[in-house]
Amino acid sequence: MTDTTRREAPRRRRRRRALTTVLVLALSGGGTYAYLSYDRAEPTPGVNDVAPQDAQQQATLVDQEDLRVMQTRAVLSSALARGGARAAQVRQPHIASSANGRTLVLTARSAPYYVADLERFAQEDFQRQSDGSYLLSINLFVAHGAKLVLQSATGPLDLRLSSEPGAFTSIVGFGASIRVNGSAQNPVRITSWDAQAGAPDTRVADGRAYIRAIGGELRMRHTHVSHLGFWSGRTGGIALTGSDRPSDSAEDVQKNRWRPERRTVLMPDGRRETTGGGMDAIEVAPARGGAGTGFQVPSANLVTGAIENSTVTGNAYGIFITASNRTGIRDTTVTGSLVHGVLMHRFARNATIENTTVRGSRGDGFVLSRATEKVSVTGCLAEGNGGNGFTLNGLPLAEGPSASGEATEGFGDSSVISSTARDNGRYGIELLGGVDLAVQTSRVVGGDMGIVVGDGARGVRVSGNELTGQRRQGIAVRDGVTGARISGNIIRQTRTGLFVRGSSAQIDGNTVHAATLHGVSLVGPAGGTRISGNTFGGAGRSAVDLLRATGPVDARNNNTCGWRDTADLTTQIRRIAKPMNVIWAGVFLLVVVSALRSRNAGPLIGRRGAHPYERQRRLEHRQAVPLPTRAARTAAGAGERHDELSGAGTR
C-alpha cells in the first residue's frame, strides 16, 4: 500500500458516513422552515452495541416524535392562517391529540408560562406529588413566540418527566423561549421518571423523556438534569437544534426572517428580562482560505441559549447543539453519557464552552463536529471517556459534487485552550482536517496518544502544552498535514515524543523527557519539516529518527545530551547504510583493494625510492676488450686481403 493510499483510507471511511435527512418541516402560516438531520457515524466501541431489534425500535420512536412535532406545528399554523372561530380557539393553550400522543400546546402570549400555568392547563397530567415534586405526564409544545419559565421562588423545583415502557414525555419549543431558572439555594431538578419503578428511567430501548429547543432559545442555570434522551442527538436529552439548511438567497432570508418584538418582562423574583429582537440572519462561511462560497442561515432557523452552573447525568447525549449561534456552556458537569458528553454539531458557530467537565462518556468527551466554526473551549476537563477527550473536526461536508451542493472547503478557527484531557480511552485531543485549529496551554495525561493532528489540517498550532504518560506518541502529525507549528510543548514518559508521518511541520522549542523509543521520528514524505531548538532526553533507538523520512528535512541545533542510545547492531547499521554513505564507502574500498593488490605484487613495488628495474636479473659480467683504432682496422683489413690473394694463387 502506498503512502497516498494509506492517507486516503481514513477519508474513504469517513465518506461512508451518510448524511441522512430524516425530516423536513415545511410548515405554512409562520413561514418557518426547520430541517432536521443527523449523521450515521462510524461505530464507537461501547456506544453502538445495541441489539438490532432495540435499534429499530428506537429509530422508529424518533420518527414518530418528529411526526408528532410536525403535526402539532402544522395544525396550529393552519388554523391560525384560516382565521375564524378555530383560530380563536387555538390561540389559547390547548391539548392536541394524535396517533403519536397527547400534547399540551402553549401558544404565544405576552406573559410567560410558569409552573402554576402548567398545573392549570395540564390538570391531572401535571400533578404535585406527596414528596413535593411535580410529575409531567403529557408532552409540552411551546409554540413560536411563547415563553416557558421553570423555576420556584419558594424552594427547589423537582420536575419529573414521565418515562415508562411504551410512553414518555418531552418538552419541545419551536421558535420559543424556554428558561430553566434555578439558583444555588433553589436549584431545579429535571429527570425522567418511571412511576412503576419509582426511579429515573435508565432503559433507552423503548424511548425516554427529553428536552429540545427547535430555533428560539433555551437557557438553563443551576439545574440538575439526569437520565434523559435516547438514540438521536435531537432526542438525546438536552438538545438545542436549528436548521442546517443554508439559504443563499436574499429573498429566502427575508421570507424566513423572525424578529419578535423586544419586550421587558417582570419575573416573579423581581428581575426584569428583555426578550426578542436579534439579527435577521447570520452569515456562515467556510474557514479562512476557503473559496468564498459562504451562505446565510435565517435567524428564525438558528437556536441560541446558554447552560450554566448545571449538572447533566446519564443522558444519551449529554448536551447536543446544532445550527446555533452564540450558544454558551459554562461551569457545568456532564457525566455518564451513553454516547458523547458535549456535541457541537453542524453549523454551531461562535460558541463558547468554559470551565465544563465531561466524565465517563462512552464516546468522546467534547466533540466539535464538521461545519462548526469559531468554537472556543477554555478551562475544560475531559476525563475517563471511552473515546477521545476532545475532538475537533474541521473536515468539509463534501469532497466533490454532492446532492446538497455543500462547499468542499474545511472549517476551523476553533480552539482548545488551558484544558485537560486525562485517562481517556483513545486520544487526549484529536484534530481532523480544517484550518487554523489550535491546542494551547493544555494538559494531556494518559491515553493511547496525546495530541493527534491529521487528515490534511492546515495551519494548526499546538503550543505550550504538557503531555504525560501516553502509550505510544505524545504529539502526532500525520496524513497530509501542512503548515503545522509544534512549539514549546513538554512531553514526558512516552515511547515517542513527537511523530510526523506524511506531513510537514515546524517543530521547535519542545522538550521531551524519558522517552523510550525516539525523541522525534519522521516517516514518509516530510519535505519542508524543520526540527530545531528542541531538547530530547531519554533512552531509546534515537533522539532524532530520520531513517524512514524522505524529502529535505532541516534538523539542527537540537540538544541531545540527555539521550542514551540503546539501538541494537541492526539499527546502527541502518543508520550508517544510507545511499551516499554506501557509495563513498564503495569508492574507498576500491582504492584500498587496489593498493593491497599492488603491495602483494612484491615488497618493493610501490615503495618510495625503489628503482623500477631493481628486481630484474643482472647481466653476466664480461671483461672489457678495447676496440681497435682506425689505423689498426685498416692494416688488419689489408692483411686479410693479402692473405686471400695469396691463398688464391696457391690454389
Image (spheres, rainbow, N blue to C red):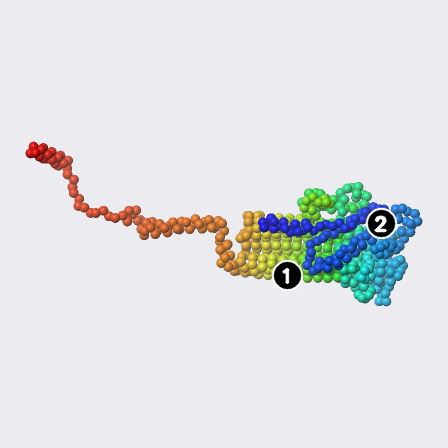
Q: Quadrant of the C terminus?
A: top left
Circle nearer the viewer, 2 or 1: 2
Q: Residue at x 16, y 40 (%)?
A: 627
Question: Can the viewer see residue 579?
Answer: yes
Numbered disc 1: secondary structure: loop
Numbered disc 2: secondary structure: helix
- Residue 212 percent location from the top left of the image: 79, 55
Residue at the far right: name it: 85
Q: Label 1 near label 2: C-beta < 8 Å?
A: no
Question: Can the viewer see residue 174?
Answer: no
- Image mark for residue 74: 2
Q: Residue at x 50, y 57 (%)?
A: 570
Name above or below for residue 58 compared with residue 257. Answer: below
- Residue 204 percent location from the top left of the image: 76, 60
Foreground residue among 9 and 234: 9
- Residue 313 percent location from the top left of the image: 75, 62
Sequence order check: which comes first, mark 2 or mark 1?
2
Report which residue position mark 1 lands on. 446
Q: Residue at x 59, y 60 (%)?
A: 494
Q: Residue at x 73, y 62 (%)?
A: 336
Q: CA distance from mark 2 to mark 1?
A: 52 Å
